[in-house]
Image (cartoon, rainbow, N blue to C red):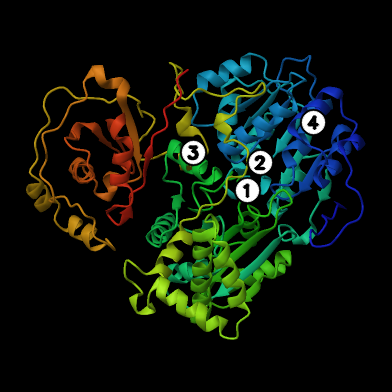
């Protein structure tokens, strides 16, 4: 086994970093890397290139975010794939569709001036379009196991010319239950092939897979037993049995992460934690296997663009998350295995950045924490829950920041500045400043009132979202540069032939509700709307609405019975160019009904709203309004509560049309 130790970012290394001049690349690949702005190859890229070009099979242990894709992409595109051969020569498998598209995008950028054709194939996209792309001379395929196996069995993917087989995130793939599909795919590949297996950890099942299917593989370990810990600070908060959510909120108050992924072990808990964060004033949303793919992409887009501070997710839903600017990973529930801890925490501290991993550990989690120390020698620093004194310090810090922000843009009078300088040298400076603050901010006896400046300062801090990272890659579905095939959002007649039901990533495909029919024009049923008596509706729903009302921490300002239905306007065909669709994050399962939307909009000043312009799905909804009323309608909806969930509303993205 060859071990290449990663440098510790806390230690100063005076050795100059090598450039890509030390890698014998062709002019076209080097030109593409220069265009991408790549200057210094990462350790994994340097370690992999030479043996890969020699045709050696490799098992590489390296964290996500260390340049793995380019590490196997450079030798494949530069030397191993013959651009004159119009057949699939390299097959790359990834555990998720997002990662498949991401890898295909990056390889297409590396192959930009070489002309190598890269095609992603994955479940959830029309089979017909993928068959066309394969038939048109694809040379590199990036795919998920289920859909790749479908193509192999149909005969639409010819494996006879495949000489390079890459497994990306091999341990993740096996932990997700893809072992059967992997073995079936490998059995259909030529025996004379080169294997490149990349994995953040090397558990026994990855070793067995490599031993049984690779010929004399060479192991490259780039982070030894401290994988994932080199550039990350690890902390644990030890708590007794009780409300973990209350402890989490207390920790977040003091830690004040700029941005974080918060991991939970169950789907229900992701929603509960996200709602608790929202009620506390943070921008948060949840991501789990119940979300439809389009909604998942919307939430991921908001996170990448800095519009969302906290993403609460399960392990399954977080597969393929690649957000470079994350400062924290928080384990609200401690993971069940040491490998899973490594994968979770590896989502921060990427690309040379520092990161922080925080875990809440209860009595039942102590055994897992011990195994983490034993397996990977990761020893998180133990902390206790924030004390009242620390919370008070946070409140004081918020006030200082609040005042600094308030006066930063104001030009101070020179006389006042001169007095301030003298004041700060006075022996009673603290007493005088405290008196001025009391006169300006009011007495602490007013705490909790609408005029409580401390509460306003805390709210201002919680409302801050992470700054947009200009280096953050676009989401995979928006990239258009480079020769990479992108399936259209609509099937344009191509049938999936039931392939999706057999696809191995069906854990995310069997959803309730569907937003694929999102439209940019209102659908208007014929005939007048059926009037409803809100009081009758109230009595029919009974306990459900009582529950919803009790869960509201503040008055909703509009109830199901607050306003009678008003005569609604109907958006006629002539008006269709002047309307807008609003995306709403609550739906039928939350107890939302069209009358609720009408009442909220009426109270917000959007009068005469027609119930027929509301389309309610199981988990989300769409509302069509005149474009002139768009901002007013969004303000009327945002922040209200339905079924214990805080409403978030925004302009719906128009579905791409090919």
Residue annotated with mark 1: 172
Sequence-first tag of 1 and 3:
1
**Label 2 near label 4: C-beta < 8 Å?**
no
* 4 and 1 marks in contact (CB < 8 Å): no
Give the mark, 2 or 1, whose residue is nearer the N terminus.
1
Circles 2, 1 touching at the beta carbon (< 8 Å): no
Mark 1 lies on a secondary structure that is helix
SS for tag 2?
loop
Give the label, 4 or 3, closer to the camera. 4
x, y percent for residue 566: 11, 38
| Mark 2 Cα shell of 10 Å, populated few (<14), some (14-19), many (≥20) | few
The residue that mark 3 highlights is 297
Distance (Cα) linking label 4 and label 2: 16 Å
Q: Residue at x 82, y 54 (%)?
A: 6
- Kindly identify which residue carries mark 4: 34
| Crowding at mark 1 (Cα within 10 Å: few <14, some 14-19, many 20+) | many
Q: Is residue 628 above or below residue 135?
A: below
Look at the numbered disc 4 and give the secondary structure of its residue.
helix
CA–CA distance between discs 4 and 1? 32 Å
**Numbered disc in front, either 1 or 3:** 3
Question: Which residue position is annotated with label 2?
Answer: 471
Pick whichever of labels 4 and 3 is earlier in the sequence: 4
Which residue is located at x 19 percent, y 35 percent? 609
| Among numbered discs 4 and 2, the one appearing first in the sequence | 4
Q: Nearer the viewer, residue 352 or 187?
A: 352
């Amino acid at each position: 086994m060859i071990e290449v130790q990663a440098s510790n970012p806390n230690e100063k290394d005076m050795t100059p970093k090598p450039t890509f001049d030390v890698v014998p690349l062709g002019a076209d690949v080097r030109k593409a890397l220069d265009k991408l702005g790549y200057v210094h190859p990462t350790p994994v890229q340097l370690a992999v290139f030479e043996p890969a070009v020699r045709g050696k099979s490799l098992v590489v242990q390296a964290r996500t975010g260390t340049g793995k894709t380019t590490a196997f992409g450079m030798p494949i595109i530069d030397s191993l794939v013959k651009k004159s051969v119009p057949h699939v020569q390299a097959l790359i498998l990834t555990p998720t569709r997002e990662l498949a598209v991401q890898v295909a995008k990056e390889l297409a950028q590396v192959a930009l001036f070489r002309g190598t054709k890269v095609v992603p194939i994955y479940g959830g996209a029309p089979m017909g379009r993928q068959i066309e792309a394969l038939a048109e001379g694809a040379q590199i395929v990036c795919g998920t196991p289920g859909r790749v196996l479908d193509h192999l069995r149909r005969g639409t993917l010819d494996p006879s010319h495949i000489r390079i087989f890459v497994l990306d995130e091999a341990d993740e793939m096996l932990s997700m239950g893809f072992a059967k599909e992997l073995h079936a795919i490998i059995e259909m590949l030529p025996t004379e092939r080169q294997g490149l297996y990349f994995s953040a950890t090397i558990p026994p099942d990855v070793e067995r897979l490599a031993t049984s299917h690779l010929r004399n593989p060479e192991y490259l370990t780039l982070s030894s037993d401290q994988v994932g810990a080199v550039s990350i600070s690890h902390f644990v908060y030890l708590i007794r049995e009780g409300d973990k959510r209350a402890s989490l909120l207390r920790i977040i108050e003091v830690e004040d992460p700029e941005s974080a992924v918060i991991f939970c072990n169950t789907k229900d808990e992701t929603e509960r934690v996200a709602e608790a964060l929202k009620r506390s004033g943070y921008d948060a949303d949840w991501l789990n296997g119940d979300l439809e793919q389009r909604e998942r992409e919307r939430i991921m887009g908001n996170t990448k663009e800095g519009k969302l501070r906290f993403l609460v997710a399960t392990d399954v839903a977080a597969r393929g998350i690649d957000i470079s600017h994350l400062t924290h990973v928080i384990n609200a529930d401690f993971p069940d295995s040491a490998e899973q801890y490594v994968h979770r925490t590896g989502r921060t501290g990427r690309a040379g950045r520092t990161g922080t991993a925080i875990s809440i550990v209860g009595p039942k989690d102590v055994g897992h924490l011990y195994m983490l120390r034993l397996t990977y020698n990761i020893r998180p620093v133990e902390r206790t829950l924030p004390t009242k004194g620390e919370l008070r310090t946070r409140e004081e810090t918020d006030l200082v920041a609040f005042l600094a922000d308030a006066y930063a843009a104001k030009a101070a009078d020179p006389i006042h500045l001169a007095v301030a300088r003298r004041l700060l040298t006075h022996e009673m400076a603290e007493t005088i400043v405290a008196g001025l603050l009391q006169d300006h901010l009011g007495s602490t006896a007013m705490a909790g009132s609408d005029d409580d400046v401390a509460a306003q300062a805390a709210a201002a801090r919680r409302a801050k979202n992470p700054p947009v990272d200009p280096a953050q890659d676009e989401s995979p579905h928006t990239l258009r540069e480079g020769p990479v095939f992108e399936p259209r959002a609509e099937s344009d007649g191509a049938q999936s032939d039931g392939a999706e039901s057999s696809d191995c990533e069906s854990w995310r495909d069997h959803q309730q509700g569907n937003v694929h029919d999102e439209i940019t024009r209102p659908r208007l049923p014929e005939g007048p709307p059926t009037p409803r008596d809100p009081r009758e509706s109230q009595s029919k729903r009974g306990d459900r609405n009582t529950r919803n009302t009790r869960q509201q921490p503040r008055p909703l300002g509009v109830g199901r019975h607050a306003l009678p239905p008003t005569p609604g306007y109907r958006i006629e065909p002539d008006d269709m160019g002047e309307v807008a669709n609003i995306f709403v994050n609550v739906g039928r399962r939350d107890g939302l009904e069209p009358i609720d939307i009408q009442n909220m909009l009426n109270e917000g000043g959007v009068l005469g709203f027609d119930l027929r312009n509301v389309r309610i799905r199981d988990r989300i909804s769409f509302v069509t309004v005149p474009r002139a009323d768009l901002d007013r309608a969004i303000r009327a909806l945002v922040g209200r509560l339905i079924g214990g969930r805080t409403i978030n509303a925004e302009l719906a993205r128009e579905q791409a049309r090919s």
